[in-house]
Image (cartoon, helix red, strand yellow):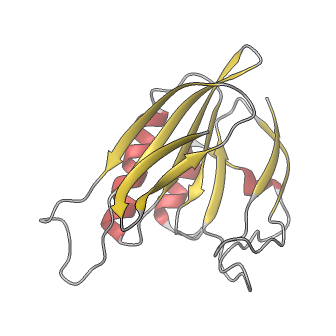
Amino acid sequence: MVFAPAIAIDRGTYGNALISRFPIRSVRTIPIQTTQKERLPGGRYEDRVLLIAEIDTDGTPLTAMVCHFGLNGIEADKATETVLNEVKKITSPLLFMGDLNLTPDDRRIQTLAATLNDTAQRSDESLLSFPADNPERKIDYIFTNDCFKTLRVEVPNVGNSDHRPIRAEIEL
């Protein structure tokens, strides 16, 4: 397991985590921050990070990226740009996942989907994940590069969070 803190809160830190059954060989944390000049008055902003982990899957390297996009447009723009800049550097099989706080029709999701494969495209279901008690929106994603084949994807009816999880069965 690895954790990439983004901000300090009262009793600890808030950020992104990744759990893997395979050994995690290295971890990088890329800050995604908006400057005071970029922020609109009255908006709620939180610094975010992109967690990038290199994982050894029985001798095959895999890169896993995890991010939680902010709610403001400038935060989502910067996060999308950061993810795409890092994706360009990756030559290994790649997974990118997270709570992106954006619906599939958002231009930033469409920009990501022009470079990566949204596993949800393999499903006939809408894969709504938020809010967990009565999902109305798809804002959680698992993307892959072309090294993977998506076999199945689902959103289980599990209410341990404010979101339902998205689960994809993929083949390398």
* Viewer-side residue, 158 vs 8: 8
Instruction: Examine the image and state in which quarter residue 140 appears.
Output: bottom right
Image position of 129 with respect to 107: above or below = below
Q: Residue 168's spot in the image, x, y percent?
A: 79, 50
Q: Give the quadrant of the C terminus.
A: top right
Image position of 125 with respect to 114: above or below = below
For this orientation, the residue located farthest to the top is 59
Instruction: Examine the image and state in which quarter residue 170 appears.
Output: top right
Image position of 86 with respect to 55: above or below = below
Q: Determine the residue positioned at 33% across, 65% down.
A: 46
* Viewer-side residue, 28 vs 129: 28
* Viewer-side residue, 113 vs 76: 76
* Viewer-side residue, 97 vs 151: 97
Q: Determine the residue positioned at 80% across, 71% down.
A: 158
Q: Determine the residue positioned at 36% across, 68% down.
A: 10
Q: Give the quadrant of the N terminus.
A: top right
Instruction: Examine the image and state in which quarter residue 91 appears.
Output: top right
Q: Residue 157's spot in the image, x, y percent?
A: 84, 73
Q: Residue 22's spot in the image, x, y percent?
A: 72, 28
Q: Determine the residue positioned at 57% across, 70% down.
A: 105
For this orientation, the residue located farthest to the left is 37
Image position of 61 with respect to 156: above or below = above
Q: Is residue 62 left or right of residue 39?
A: right
Count the marks.
0
Q: Residue 85's spot in the image, x, y percent?
A: 39, 38
